[in-house]
Image (cartoon, rainbow, N blue to C red):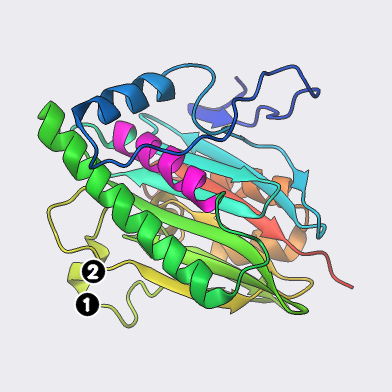
Amino acid sequence: MPEVGEQSLDFSPAHQPEGAVEQKKQSEIPAWRSNAKTSVALRRNLSTPESLVRRLSSTEVEDREKITIGAATAAEKVNEDNHFYDQQGIAVVCDGVGSSENGGVASEVATDLLAKQLQKIDTDTNRENAEKSIADALQDTDMFIQWEQAMTGQDMASTASVMKVITEGEKTYAVIGNVGDSPVYRMRNGKLKELTNYNQDLPAREHRQALGKDLPLRPHVFSVRFKQGDLLLLTSNGVRKNDPEMKGMRKILDKIREPQKIAESLVTRLNGKSRDARTVIVVARPPK
């Protein structure tokens, strides 16, 4: 694995030739409510090389509408971030809560469950249905992790930011769901804006939200137009901690346009103020 200074970086290609990895059929995730065996079976499957979902890491993919995606992650110490993305325009970033004993486990379980459920959402659905599906996915994942804690006695929690790209009529939208302090940004016409409401409309208590915490969950779910030339960035909170005013991010986005290079530059250059792990997924629609 490449290293820069003391950082642990993940820039490894995720794609392999077709047939190189046997893909499991997309089976239904057993309902978390069913019985105690559900948790054991799911965790056993997650721990095998053939996971419930295909984990992609740090490479570029292109979907049917020519959406380009790149991702990277870096950490000086423990990395409790997990991420997923695929050709359907799905992106998931989960950041294990450091105050919990098993934040990395929680973020891995959350990433796999959320990715699996987002894959079920039709890319041609409407925004209302997609938003409801994402809100339900976040709620179900929260309950599953709470149930895991009750079954195992282990403390675990994770934040989450997720996105699904859909087409409604002739327009393309990004449907976004957020729990906790993992921010989502948009770069449009040279202007960078945070789309999540951290330090804006939500009370401070909302920023302590996390999947698996014993608090009423209030996911922030919304849709935005995804126009040609737009960049959408899903990040873990380590990015914000190292660049709270987005100055470093703006400089990088002004100079680099390729999603993979953007992701790698952000996780390597935005460091120093915090030793938290940094994960970035960049989703781009090429300009006309």
Q: Which residues are magenta?
A: 105-118
User: According to the image, label 2 marks what residue?
Assistant: 206
Q: Amino acid at mark 2?
A: Glu
Q: Quadrant of the N terminus?
A: top right
Asked whether 116 falls inside the magenta stretch, the response is yes
Q: Is residue 282 above or below residue 95?
A: below
Which numbered tag is attached to residue 203?
1
Q: Is residue 275 left or right of residue 269?
A: left
Q: Residue at x 56, y 51 (%)?
A: 91
Residue 82 shows up from this direction: yes
Q: In the orientation shown, which residue stands out farthest toward the right? A: 288
Q: Residue at x 50, y 64 (%)?
A: 184
Residue 268 shows up from this direction: no
* Tags 2 and 1 touching, CB below 8 Å: yes
Under circle 1, the secondary element is loop
- How many neighbours does mark 2 have within 10 angstroms: few (below 14), some (14-19), or many (20 or more)? many
Place residue 111 in its image quadrant.
top left
Q: Amino acid at mark 1?
A: Pro
Identify which residue, 241 or 150, lies in the foreground: 150
Q: Is residue 31 left or right of residue 183?
A: left
Identify which residue, 112 or 203, lies in the foreground: 112
- How many neighbours does mark 1 have within 10 angstroms: few (below 14), some (14-19), or many (20 or more)? few
Q: Is residue 192 left or right of residue 21?
A: left
Q: Quadrant of the C terminus?
A: bottom right
How far across and down, in percent of the image, does residue 41 sit?
33, 23
Q: Residue at x 50, y 49 (%)?
A: 92
Q: Is residue 193 above or below residue 35?
A: below
Determine the CA span between mark 2 and mark 1.
6 Å
Q: In the orientation shown, which residue stands out farthest toward the bottom? A: 201
Under circle 2, the secondary element is helix
Q: Residue at x 39, y 35 (%)?
A: 108
Q: Is residue 81 above or below residue 126?
A: above
